[in-house]
Image: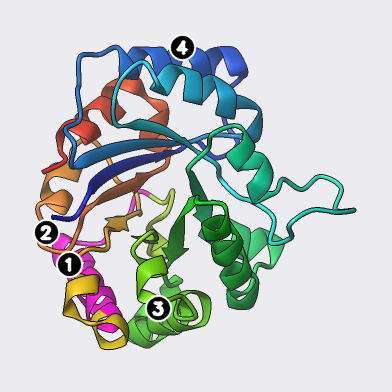
Amino acid sequence: MRKQIAAANWKMNLTYQQGAELLKTIITSGISPNENQQVLFAVPFPYLELTNDTAHLKENYFAAAQNCSDKKSGAYTGEVSAEMLKSIDVSFCLVGHSERREYFGETNEVLAAKVSICLTYNISPVFCCGEALGIREQNTQNAFVEQQLRESLFHLSAEQILNVIIAYEPIWAIGTGKTASTAQAQEMHAHIRAVLKKQYGQEIAQKIAILYGGSVKANNAKELFACEDVDGGLVGGASLIAADFIEIIRALQ
């Protein structure tokens, strides 16, 4: 059975004190994810230890980094390595978020290196993929997303790919208030699973969690998560509001 995951992405928001209050409110709200559910908080680097400490108050809550370097160590001022993350007990890391691709020029090749170095340190990458509006309008989104997967993930063995979480984020629906219809979300998620099946086989493909990440909100999460191939969500703005993210956690199947 695939994991069902609600992943918060705080991006570059909240002070330390605001973050601490938000975490406490959510984790002490009485929601107890079961053994097949996980709640991740992808927080800014300075808040990772705080998040770990708070998450450990309850089972199935975890801290996640928003990024890591593709290098092991060295003269890379301002960068944070996978080894550093592991040394503070971080077990998840976002890789390839559309904002990293757009603003920092991260290529599929760079992301392949980041995925590999995360796995070297037993950190599960949450690999983000998705298309811009122009690609969707040309109806070439399936081929585009397949290329992202092939160039960034398919160097992995079957054993390694099982430790990867995939998050599909239609870029045209991030922070815009637009959301892919449930039919559009399911169609792409089914395509991603079919691509995984072609590369790794049915058994492996059925075990990999695929999250939807495009303006997930408290009022649409249940419908989205009910789709056969949608295994939860990567949540931006709504994860900054305790009541909303609590409802999104409740929407996990």
Q: Residue at x 46, y 71 (%)?
A: 132
- Locate the N terminus by quadrant: bottom left
Q: Residue at x 25, y 13 (%)?
A: 29
x, y (%) of residue 48? 57, 29
Q: Quadrant of residue 238?
A: top left
- The answer to whether residue 133 is visible is yes
Provide the secondary structure element on which disc 1 rests.
helix
x, y (%) of residue 175? 44, 48
Q: Which mark is residue 186?
A: 1
Q: Where are the magenta residues, as a range?
A: 177-196
Q: Mark 1 to mark 2: distance in Å? A: 6 Å
CB under 8 Å between callouts 1 and 2? yes
Count residues near mark 3 (Cα–Cα under 10 Å), then give few for <14, some for 14-19, many for 20+. Answer: many
Residue type (three-letter) at the residue carrying disc 2? Cys
Judging by the rendered image, the residue that carries numbered circle 3 is: 145
Judging by the rendered image, the residue that carries numbered circle 4 is: 21
Judging by the rendered image, the residue that carries numbered circle 2 is: 227
Q: Mark 2 to mark 4: distance in Å? A: 33 Å
Q: Which comes before the other along the chain, label 3 or label 1?
A: 3
Q: Mark 3 to mark 4: distance in Å? A: 37 Å
Is residue 28 part of the magenta span, yes or no? no
Provide the secondary structure element on which disc 4 rests.
helix
CB under 8 Å between callouts 3 and 2? no
Provide the secondary structure element on which disc 3 rests.
helix
Q: Mark 3 to mark 1: distance in Å? A: 14 Å
Q: Which comes before the other along the chain, label 1 or label 2?
A: 1
